[in-house]
Image (tube, helix red, strand yellow):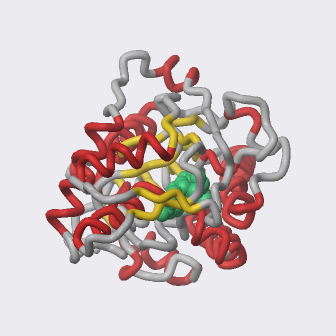
Amino acid sequence: MSNKSRKKLTLVTGAGGLLGYAIRQLAPKDTDYITRSDGDLTDFAKTKKIFQKIKPNQVIHLAAEVAGIGGNMMHSGKFFRDNIMININIFEAARINGVDKLISFMSTCVFPDKCKYPLNEKDIQSGPPHPSNFGYAYAKRMLEVQSAAYRKEWGCNFIVAIPTNIYGENDFWNLEDGHVVPSLIHKCFLAKKNKEDFIVWGSGRPLREFVYSQDVAKLILWAIDEYNEESPIIFTNSKESSIKDLVDLVVREVGFKGKVIFDSTKPEGQFRKPSDNSKLKKYLPNFKFTPLDKGIKNTVEWFIKNYPNVRM
Ligand code: GFB
């Protein structure tokens, strides 16, 4: 945490991760960042202290317990408990310290498993989420409820965004718990280094909408200033790619020449979760998302340059 005495405008929580890294490249100077080492946000007294010290006007609340499909299946209790506690504490500390605006984040895995496509902001609570991440998904769904309740009783301008599958520099590169993009880049890199097969989970057929962290960071900085609706907003280019498409890009960028094996004993999660970006397009008709091949190229370059000093 910065210890300069000037008044801070914006506080970014969970700033040590993927989106925190992207926001740091773009955010205005009056921004303060906290990471896990600044205090345990599941503890209300510690959270309150941080807010009293920094006195932010705005909060970009990224802090969360997150993981890919493997981590979600292993830790449904922890992910439910910790995310609920963090969000309760952050919202309350923000309210009692007079924060003007707070943006928090869900993910498209919060949507019902059986839902009409494309997923729309209106459908979040209309059925149970996919079993692979129900603990995380139910905790994150409460952000919509919490924001609406705080607006209603206390007039807080708290908003919620829903990015789809985010990837980019400074991701979490764990082979078992990471999201698909960082895990596959790391696995492919190791397969090349150790002259082994490159093992991919599942059939490669599931579809995802990958969004580059730098694009999401731009959208967050727009939303904290300009988006004021109670209803959440989905951040996506609405462009689906299969896991196989992703594998091909990773293989090309890593320069892997060996054998790729799709391991059907591993989990696949939801088959697809195509999302409606018409609300985003209404606000930002000219916003250009980074194409997946360019984003993967940048991400692989970053990983290779920083390995082994990466989060994993
Ligand atoms: O990123 P991921 O774990 O998230 O991607 P989800 C899972 C998809 O990628 C599945 C395939 O179809 C997997 O079979 N996959 C292939 C792999 N190889 C790998 C690998 O090495 N690691 C991983 N992780 N997947 C998450 C939710 O779901 O989406 C989270 O669990 C969060 O809660 C996130 O919301 C955005 O898209 O399946």
Q: Would you say residue 15 is visible in this rendering?
A: no
User: What residue is rendered at 67% in x and 64% in y?
Assistant: 136
Measured from the top left, where is residue 277 in percent x and y? 55, 26
User: What residue is rendered at 32% in x and 50% in y?
Assistant: 250
Q: Quadrant of ligand 1?
A: bottom right
Q: Is residue 290 above or below residue 82?
A: above
The answer to which image quadrant residue 6 occupies is: bottom left
Measured from the top left, where is residue 251 in percent x and y? 31, 51
User: What residue is rendered at 67% in x and 70% in y?
Assistant: 73
Q: Nearer the viewer, residue 173 or 217?
A: 173
- Quadrant where the C terminus sits is bottom left
User: What residue is rendered at 24% in x and 49% in y?
Assistant: 253
Measured from the top left, where is residue 124 in percent x and y? 74, 42
Q: Residue furthest left?
A: 305
Compared across the picture, whether 153 is left or right of 175 comes to right
Measured from the top left, where is residue 265 in percent x and y? 64, 66
Q: Nearer the viewer, residue 136 or 43?
A: 136
